[in-house]
Amino acid sequence: MKYLDLAIDRAVQLGAEYADIRIHKTTTEVLYLQNKSIKNANNDVLYGYGIRVLKDGTWGFAHSSVFTEDALLKTVQKAYDTAKLSAIVKNGDGIRLANERSYIASYKTPYKVDPFGIPLKEKAELFLEINQRMMNLKEIKKANSFFRAQKDEKLFASTIGTRLDINTLYINPQITAIAISDYDSQSRTFDEGGRGVGWEWIEQLDLLEKSRYVAEEAVMKLNSDELKEEKRRTLVLDPNHLGLTMHESVGHPTELDRVLGWEADYAGISFATPEKLGNYQYGSKIVNFVGDNTLEGGLATAGFDDDGVPGQKWHIIKDGVLQEYGTTRETAPFIGVDYSRGCNRATHYYDQPINRIPNLYLLPGKKELTPAQLISDTEEGVYIQGRGSFSIDQHRVNFQFGGDFFWEIKDGKLIRPLKKVLYRSNNPEFWNSCDAICDKRFWKPFGVINCGKGQPNQTARMTHGASPARFRNIRVGGSK
Amino acid sequence: MKELVSSIYEIIKKEHKADDYEVYISFSDDHEARFAQNAMSQHMTGQIVKVVYEASIDRKTASSSVNQYDEDTIRQLVKTTEDLARISQEDPEYIDSMGKQDFPKTDNIKPATTNLTPETIVNIIKDAVDFAKSKGTKLSGIFSLNKTSFYFYTKKGFEGSYDTCSYEFSMTMKEGERETKVSTAGKDFSKFSLQNQLDQLYSQFSSLDKPNAMEPETISVILRPQAVANIMMYLRWLLDRRMADDGITPLKGQIGKQFFGEKFNMSTVENDDNMTIIPFFNDSVLKQIDWIKDGVLMAQPISGTYANMIDEKPSSMFNVFIQGDTTSEEDMMKMAGRGLIINNFWYIRTNDMRTFDLTGMTRDGVLYFENGKVKHSVNNFRFNEKLHEITRRIMALGESTIVFNSSVVPTMLIKDFHFIDRTNF
C-alpha cells in the first residue's frame, strides 16, 4: 500500500531514528440479549493509522483516520514534532530499541467458518433460545447472552524494512443465568473468554446443552450454603478459574514495563524485579509457565507484534523459578537484553502499543493424574470453577479471588455446593503451595478479552491455559 | 464543524428507510503525555471521529458505527444497520427514540484549556520531573487534554449538541518503598497550579516514612477525596432501579426509606464550575436530582426502556456531587482520636451485589493517627465492606472537591472501617 512507503520515506527524510506505521481496521460485531430482548445488535468499524517516531531517544505518536497523502504526511510530521518536543524530559540517551531483523510476511488466523458470514438472525435465534431455556427454570429471573466477533486487519511497515500483512479473528460467546429469591441472587456463567477461531467453535460448544447446566447450577448456587468460617483449606481450581488467577498473579507481574515502573502511576508495578531472575522461587517445582504467542487459537497469536517481532514460545517460570519476562524492543534493553519476546501490542489504530501479557499458560503435570483422582486425594477443601470477584494490589503480591461455582470437598468427595467463597493469598505463597497438576489430557485454554492497561486505557486480549491444579493451606472463607 | 456534521446527517436523513433512528456524531481531539521514572514514556496526539447510526424497523433494532464520513461510507453505514435491523428479532422492550426536548445550556468551554499547547504540557512535566529529581525521587504520571464536540439526532425530533474540554493530571512520586500519588482534573485549566500539586504531593510523600507494621482491625478512617470517589463511584452503577426491582441489589422497595447514613447526600447537578457537564444522553436530559438525601433513597437511575415498562420517567446519573461540610482533617483526627488516613483505594470489586459487599485495598500511602495527630505511616490493607453501611458510619465530612471530571466529593471520616488483611510488598 502506497501509504506505508510514503510514511516511512517521510519519517526517514525528517531524521527519525526509527519509525513505523500501522494501518489498522477493526471490525466488531456484538450481540447482547437480556431475557427475550435484544439489547444490542451492533457492527462497528474503526479504520485509521498510527505512526510512531523515535527521535532523540523519545517517542512521538500521532494517529489519523483521514486517508489522503496530505493528511498522512502531516501525521508523520506531528509524530516527529511530538517526539522532538518530548526529548527535553528523558534519562540519559533515552530509549534504545533491542535488535531485530526485518521481515516481509503475512499472517491469518486459521478458521473454517467466518463468523461475520453467519446471518444475525441465525445468531439471534440461537441466543434467544438459550435465554429461553435458561428461563424455563422458575428461579431464573434473568438470562443474559453475549456474542462478540472481531477481526483486525493490519498493515505494518517500519524503517528497518519490515512489511507485514496481518489478519486476526476471534469470537467470544457468554451465557449467564441469574437465580433470584427473596433473600439472595446468584449467577452462573459459561464463558471461556474467547478464542482465535471461527464460528465452527460455536457449533462444537453445544451452547443449548450448556445453558441447561448453567441454569441448574445457578439455582443450586442460590440454595447453597456459605462457608461458616475462614480457615486454611485446600483449593482445587479448574482451568477457567486458573486462567484469571495466572493472568493477575503471573501475567501482569512479568510484564517488563511494569517491572521497570512505567505503569507506576496507574496499573502499578511488579514485585518480580530483575535481580530475582533465575533464582526466585515463584512457585513449587511442578509450576512451569510458558509465554507462547504461537499458540494455535491463542488470542495474542498474530504472527508478529506491533514492533514487527515474530511470535515466540519461552519459559517465564521453569521448575518454579522466575526465568524471563514478556518484553518489547523498547523494554528489553533496560535489563541488558538485546532481543524482544514480541509482546508489544496496541488495541486500536489510535493507541500507541505497550508491553502486554502474551498467551501465558501453566504446563500440565508430567505424571498421569485425572481431576477425579485429584479430588479423591483431597481430604478437605473447596473446588472452584469459573471466574468471580478478583482484586490484586498494585505490586501484584496480595490478592483475593472468588469464583463462579464452588463445591465443598470432604474425604475425597464433592459433598455439597457452596456460594460466596473467597480465598486470599499472595505471591509467592500461592504458587508455591501448588502440589498437584492434572496431566495434559485435561489441559484447556481460556481467553481474556478485556485486559485493561495503560493511559488512556487499552483493552488487550490473550489466552491462558491450565489443567486442574491443587493448592494447599490457603485462607478460604467468605467476605468476613 | 457544524457544517460537516450537518452534511453527514443530511445523507442519513436522505438515505434512511427506518421507522425510527438515533444518530450520534462525535469529534474528539486528544493529547496524552505519559511520563515514568523521570522521563517521557509515551506522547500521543490525534482526532478520533465516531458516527453511530441506530435504526429500528418493525420494532427490531440494530446499530453500527464508523469513523470515516465520506458519502459512500455513510450510505453504507445506513444500509448495513438497516439490513441488520431487518433480520434481527422484535424487541419486546422496544421504545421510540427520544422526542424533541429542551436541555440545559452548559458552560464547558474554557479558553485556558482549549488554548493549551503541547509545549506547555511538556514544560509542566519537565518542571514536575525536575522537582522530583531535586528530591531524589522518581516521578510517573500523565497529562491528558481532551476537546470533544458531540451531536445527537433522533427521527422523533431530538436535536442537540454540546462541546466539552477537559484536562487531567496525575503524578506518582516514588523512592524505594515510599510511594504516593496526587491527581487533579477539570474543565478550566486557569485553576490549575502545578505548585499546589507538587506541594500536596511532596507533603504526602514526606509523611510516608518507613511504614510501621500494623495488623488489620476495625478502625476509624479519614478517606481523602480520591478514595471516596473510587469507592462511591460504585453507586453510579448499583443504584440502578431495574437491578433493584429484579432483586440483584438490595434496593428493592427502598425509595423513600433511610437506607444510607443520614449524613450522606448524593445528587446530580446542572451546573458546576469544575466538572464537565453533559446535558443529555440518548434517553434523558440533564436535570438536578437528589438521589440520596440525608440518607434517604430519593430516586434511582432508570433507563428509557425500563421507565417505559414501569411507567416512570427515565433519569440518568450525569454526574456525582456528594455534599461535603467544613470539617478539617485536623478536627477529624481529634474527633476520632485514633485511626488511619487513606489516600486512595485500589482494585475495588463487588464480592456480592445483593448485599453491596465490596473488596479493595488501600494505595498511595496510609497514615496512622493517635490523640489527634499523625504518628507514622503503616502498611497497606485489604477491606471487605458493605457500601451503604459505610455511609451509615460517617462521622464528619470535609469540603467537596473535584476528583474526576464528573465527580465532586468530600473527605469523609468513617468509624469502624473493616480491614481484614495486610497487603505486604
Image (cartoon, coloured by chain):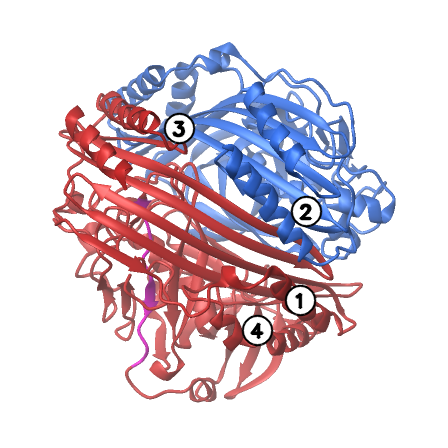
In this view of the protein, can residue A90 be seen by the observer?
Answer: yes
| Above or below: residue A319 compared with residue B289 | below
Give above or below for A396 relative to B219.
below
Q: Callout 2, which amino acid?
A: Leu
Q: Does residue B424 appear anywhere in the picture? A: no
The residue closer to the viewer here, A187 or A134, is: A134
Tell me if B380 is positioned left or right of A309 in this view.
Answer: right
Query: What residue did someone put label 3 on?
Result: B46
**Can you give x and y, in whole percent of width and height, for residue B46 in the image?**
39, 28
- The reply to whether label 4 and label 1 mark residues of one chain is yes
Kind of element beneath mark 1 = helix
Q: Which residue is mark 2?
A: B238
Q: Quadrant location of the C terminus of chain A? A: bottom right
Spatial CA span between label 1 and label 3: 41 Å
Q: Residues within 10 Å of mark 4 (few under 14, many from 20)?
A: many
Mark found first going from the N terminus, 3 or 2? 3
Residue corresponding to mark 4: A406
Check if mark 4 and mark 2 are on a common chain.
no
Report how far apart the C-alphas of labels 3 and 2 lie in the structure: 35 Å
Quarter assignment of residue B115:
top left
User: In the rendered structure, which segment of residues is drawn in magenta?
Assistant: A354-365
Pointer 1 local density, CA inside 10 Å: few below 14, some 14–19, many at least 20:
few
* Badge nearest the viewer, 4 or 3: 3
Residue that numbered label 1 is attached to? A125
Q: Secondary structure at mark 2?
A: helix
